[in-house]
Image (spheres, rainbow, N blue to C red):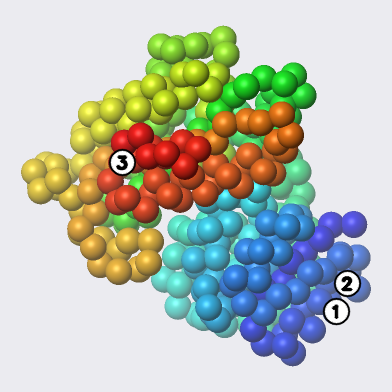
Amino acid sequence: MPTVLVADDDPNLRFLLSDTLQRAGFAVLAVEDGLSLIRVAQDQLPDLILIDLMLPGIDGYEAIRQLRNDTRTSHVPIIIVTARTNPADVVIGFDTGADDYVTKPFNEAELIARIRSLLRRTTQRPVRNPLTGLPGNLLISEEIRYRLQQGEKFTLLYIDLNDFKAFNDAYGFARGDQAIRLVANICEQAQAHFAPHSTFLGHIGGDDFVMLCPTTIAADLALWIVQHYEQAAAALYDEADRTCGYLIGHDRSGNLSYIPIGAIAIGGVSSTPSATIDELSRSAAAMKHAAKGFGGSAVVIDGLRLR
């Protein structure tokens, strides 16, 4: 029985959605705010999420962004349920990572049909990312599990572009795809340069990548990626922005800021004999978050900033 997580601050609508879904044969989890949504999604990993954009605390846009940036939830399909009729609001939702949307008041039959259709498409998704051809979430999880079972000492590197949304807003999604392919190419070059037979490269989605490598080379590998990405990324920017050294756009908090060009963050965590996939992915996400907090390019592995 597929599980659907419903996030809406209106108790009447939560009840209506829950009742509709349960009658259609789904298990339902229901929350009223953005923080609870993220916590429940991470802890219980639903098959699909229905989310209202106007949530208290963390709004729907930020909740979607955080879910897409977490290895545990980045693959979960998300449908926006919104009373907003402005197309720009829906576009922002899609840019943040939503897969579909329905408007309030919703038609029950249409909502159930959209959910089932999206779940079918999700189960048919290829195991490799269609943009880069790299292994996706399923193969990444299998590789981590295998290395843990073999007792290998390895480091999980979580690679993410800084302020990628601001880049897309400035230059459009086509150039955004170029940036993603550039990250993939540089990571593949790093893989070949250091240890092609003992490293693994996967593409979580969007601008998020994962590399597994021997712990002994993790620091050098991460620093190599940062150096080469910074050198190559300048070509993605217009000359005026290269000259300034920054874009003017909205940061992760929605504030208008000067955003450094060509910045990339890498967080890493080393395996332990008792580690689980969930623990490693959670810790790597925390290290990446710490690296992104420095603004420019940064590498943080096992709590230590290397750059």
Q: Image height check: is 142 above or below 199?
A: below
Mark earlier in primary sequence (2, 3): 2
The answer to whether the residues at label 1 and label 2 have Cβ atoms under 8 Å apart is yes
For the C terminus, the quadrant is top left
Instruction: Pinpoint residue 146: horizontal percent, then vertical percent.
Output: 73, 24
**To which quarter of the image does residue 25 belong?**
bottom right
Q: Percent x, y for residue 193? A: 41, 11
**Which residue occupies the foreground of this view, 113 or 143?**
143
Q: Is mark 1 on a helix, strand or loop?
A: helix
Residue linked to disc 1: 19
The residue lying toward the viewer, choosing from 248 and 129, is: 248
Determine the residue positioned at 73% across, 57% down.
43
List the residue tagged with mark 3.
Answer: 297
Residue on which the image places disc 2: 22
**Cα distance in 3D space between marks 1 and 2:** 5 Å
Q: Residue furthest bottom?
A: 12
Residue 139 quadrant: top right
Label number found at residue 149: none
**Residue sitting at 41 percent across and 22 percent down?**
221
Examine the image and state in which quarter residue 20 appears. Answer: bottom right
Task: Report the amino acid beneath label 1.
Answer: Asp
x, y percent for residue 187: 43, 25
Task: Give, as a three-letter code, the residue at label 3.
Answer: Ser
Mark 2: few, some, or many residues within 10 Å (few <14, many ≥20)? some
Q: Which residue is drawn at 30% across and 51% down?
A: 295
Upstream in the sequence, badge 3 or badge 1? 1
Mark 3 element type: loop
| Helix, strand or loop for disc 2 | helix
Alpha carbon of mark 3 to alpha carbon of mark 1: how far?
47 Å
Can residue 75 be seen from the camera position used here?
no
- Mark 3 vs mark 1: in front: 3
